[in-house]
Amino acid sequence: MAMLDNKIGLVLGVANKRSIAWACAKACAAEGARMAFTYQAERLKETVDELAGTLNDSLVVPCDVSEQETLDAAIDAVKQRYGRLDFIVHSIAFAPKEALEGEFVNTSRDAFRMALEISAYSLTQVARAALPLMTEGGSIVTMSYYGAEKVVMNYNVMGVAKSALESSTRYLAADLGKDNIRVNAISAGPINTLSARGVRGMGSLLGYVGERSPLKRNVTADEVGNTALFLISDLASGITGETIYVDCGYHIMGI
């Protein structure tokens, strides 16, 4: 029996086949999960439709977390299609391009608000909206990065947002544990995804981390996806409120 047979998931953040969210979805689908996918902008709909169409009994719905009504509609569509939810993969983040270069001290109020709202608050927002469908417990997994705890050049306000995201993970884990819902974050190493390319100097960062990590390489999206599968499955039934590093060991290195 596959690990996620008869499990229903909601995946937020697929942009293309290189997305971490898609790697998570592939790993879960291989173990029997059925999933709903969201897309934020109409320009992404065709790509998400195409990818989701390769999986069994998938659903694709629009959702912009900055507009509560679209999230509510997405959750309602999941309810109508599947009747319940067993897991959520939250892999969405955003900050204006100008906030991801130069000095953090120059971050505007609007950029700060937008980054925190979309990249951090949305986890709480999605969890609250989905809670009525998670009647049999379940797992919520979100995506963080090392910039949440250490300064990474040009990551700027996104690092602050990821710090808030990791803290939110712990508070949500404490709140939702009574409902047998586990909440964990994966701190993935840098991966050349569409969103990562918005950070200035990403190519140099990939090279540096690949050289410095104990495994002497960069992590792959599939490795992150497999970790998400583990956290979603019953193999991780005793794990909640954690940030799991999947970065080829880079975070352990000092000078």
Image: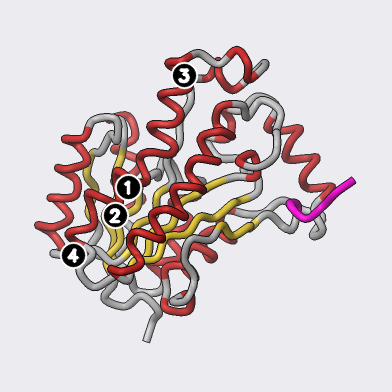
Above-or-below relation of 153 to 140: above
Q: Quadrant of residue 33?
A: bottom left
Residue that label 1 marks: 50
Q: Quadrant of residue 146?
A: top right
Q: Quadrant of the N terminus?
A: bottom left
Left of 250 or right of it: where is 8? left
Query: Marks 1 and 3: which is nearer the front?
Result: 3
Above-or-below relation of 127 to 26: above
Rounded to the nearest whole Å, what is the CA distance between mark 4 and mark 3? Answer: 35 Å
Instruction: Please say whether residue 251 is one of the residues in the magenta stretch.
Output: yes
What crowding class fits label 4: few (fewer than 14 Cα within 10 Å), some (14-19), or many (20 or more)?
Answer: many
Left of 21 or right of it: where is 216? right
Rounded to the nearest whole Å, what is the CA distance between mark 4 and mark 1? Answer: 24 Å
Indicate the secondary structure of the residue bearing disc 3: helix
Q: Earlier in the sequence, mark 4 or mark 1?
A: 1
Q: Earlier in the sequence, mark 4 or mark 2?
A: 2
Indicate the secondary structure of the residue bearing disc 4: loop
Q: Residue 70: give x, y in percent of width and height.
A: 19, 36
Residue that label 4 marks: 84
Q: Earlier in the sequence, mark 2 or mark 3?
A: 2
Left of 253 or right of it: where is 6? left
| Callout 2 amino acid | Gly
Identify the image's colour scheme: rainbow, by chain, secondary structure or one colour. secondary structure
Q: What range of the chain is rendered magenta? A: 250-255
Q: Are marks 2 and 1 in contact (CB under 8 Å)?
A: yes
